[in-house]
Image (tube, grey):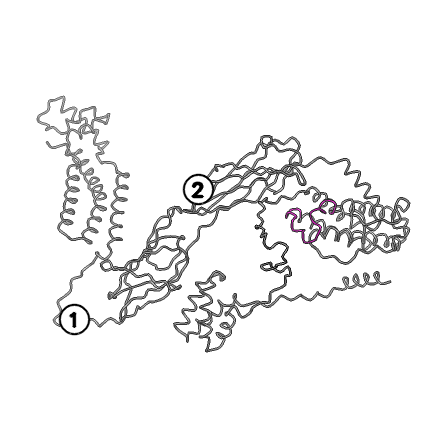
Amino acid sequence: MTPALPIQRALAVARRRHAAIVAAFALPVLGYVAASLATDRSPAALLQAGVVIAITALVAWLKRPGRDLRGLVRRLDARPDLEDSADLLFAAPGSLGPLQQLQRQRLLDRLACRPADLRAAWPLRSLLAIWIVFGTLTAATIWLFPQGITITLPQRPSPTPAPTAAAATDLVVETARLHAEPPAYTGLAAGTQPELSGKFAQDSRLRWTLRFAPQPEAVELVFHDGQRLPLTREGEDWTATRTLSKSTLYRIVPAGPLPLRDDALHRLDAIPDQPPQIRAVAPERSLTLATPGQRQWALDFEASDDHGLGPARLEITLAQGSGEQVTVTEQTRVLRGEGDARLRRYAHTLDLARLGLAEGDDLIVRLVVADNRAPSPQQSRSASFILRWPLPPSAESTGMEGLVKKALPAYFRSQRQIIIDAEALLADRPRLTADEFMLRSNNLGVDQRLLRLRYGQFLGEESEGEPEPPPGYEDGEHAEGDGHDHASEPPAAPTPPGGDSMLELYGHTHDEAEAATLLDPETRALLKQALDAMWLSEGGLRQGDPAAALPHAYRALGFIKQVQQASRIYLARTGLELPPIDEARRMTGDRKGIASRTTGLAPRDAGENPALPLWQALAGPDGGEPALEAFADWLRANEARVDDPLSLVAAIDALRRDPACTDCRAALRARLWPLLPRDAAMTPARPRPGERGQAYLDALRTEASP
């Protein structure tokens, strides 16, 4: 049955589209078949290729357009303008009746205005899938069997025999592959690289695959620490396996009469698993004071790890009581963070009432996070964060402070009293002469200096000598006009600390300057800022400018008030474990095994490190071999003390193999520089003061002289 001419044209266009689709499907299949035949030309492989090609051709033939007449008619009848009469286009005109011929002519006219489109749509999803599948198979075949792909070019027969190849003089590494399988807990994928050096995760399993030309008798890997790893021959390849526990250098050493052409050192760096990193989001400070009516304490931490986080817990410690009656309660809560395996957020809110926090108590929290390293996970602990509920101010202590201030000598005042006296001095300035104003301002500066030295003891600062009374105050008395109420002061009194003195707050803890390290870092920072402000205030007062000194004095007073709030110091409580007492030695006077209580500075041993002799020997054009061997022995025993020992080992090996190499000597000498012993530190000379500084020092000497 011959279709009408418009249908024949539409079928021709559809067949061309079908041929293009078949070619798009056949290309990746034929590429895989070609790669398979290149690697394997056995009869089974040829039969498999023939079957694949035959199936592809059969499917293309069965799916060609126009083969299914009924399906073609149904597709044409889908057009509304053909009025379900598409079968008339495939019938002979002589076999149709008058009405059928009229209907057929109407259909032909409509097809002339709007031709039929019988082309199949492009199956993009199927094409993409088959290209991915057969493209991956082709690439894998070429990668796994590169030696099987050979291209033979036709050559003309030579009338004369080809000359025989020259005998090999050395070994050549034709192919090299290094396969690494990281530990399972890292989540890293295994990989293969052609380089014999690289960086891998610690405890990765490495597998070498080498091929030589010509084949050696035996091959082994010699590491820089003296270990040897023999390779096993598997067909034409030599293989070996080793777990990379630490960074190392190695060299390929074949056995037999032929040396290896490229026998350079190869470096393997083991990347250790880092412990988790913890960052506190809330609270922002290590010490937080509870506000009135506070019932909850919101905590927020962020933890990260290079390979993945494990379980996390919150350690809670409640310290109650004071003095010798402190009781400690500890509990632990497991936290579930939000986020991925490498970065998680831990948010938790503590109910203060359920924990039993009361006035005068401290609540200490700390987050502990582990990673997923196997078999021994690593743990990290955050800093301790304290929520303190301070006690209400005591009326009795306020009264005692007032009594102490009354008994305080005039030349050792509090910071508040210095501010009051400085403001009074500014108010009295119009009624005072310049000399009187300068004397009173200088006296206040001396008082500020004494108070600064008193507070400086809690930071471990050295004393500047015994406190001296200000000018005009000798033998327990001071001059008129110094701004003090003499009628209300006793003639003499001991030297107790001032109303704002730190000794009242910390005298039980810091009786010595060396004990200042027990202050927490924030308290030390506040006290340091107070001392800096006192120094600036003292400078303004000693120069006769109380107005410039007052802002610094106010700042110092504010810092002192903040320091007074930090009255409790939290230390991690550990059990007291004393050594057992030897009853047989009691009351015998035997001092055997008791360490000496006297300590001193140990002299520096410059001869322990052989880096200096080697560095000096490498400076000349020759020499250095004896020192080189001595330093190599020292380096093997002290690798942990050197930042990059493998670079030094490689530099030593390069110089040992070529002693005449000038660049090798210079490279080794440069790497020895950080290991040279340093000279003892000397006290730097005090810089000479400027003109204004010298005038200030001269004024101080004049004032101190009788």
Q: Secondary structure at mark 1?
A: loop
Q: Residues within 10 Å of mark 1 (few under 14, many from 20)?
A: few
Q: Quadrant of the N terminus?
A: top left
- Name the foreground residue: 702 vs 135: 702
* Separation of marks 1 and 2 at Cα, in angstroms: 65 Å
Q: Is residue 592 above or below residue 25?
A: below
Membership of 511 in magenta stretch: yes
- The amino acid marked with disc number 1 is Ala
**Residue labelled with disc 2:** 341
The outermost residue toward the left is: 94
- The amino acid marked with disc number 2 is Ala
**Residue labelled with disc 1:** 162
Name the spot of residue 173 as percent of width and height, x first: 29, 64
Which residue is drawn at the image coordinates 14% and 34% (left, top)? 67
Q: Secondary structure at mark 2?
A: loop
Find the magenta span and give its range.
Answer: 503-523
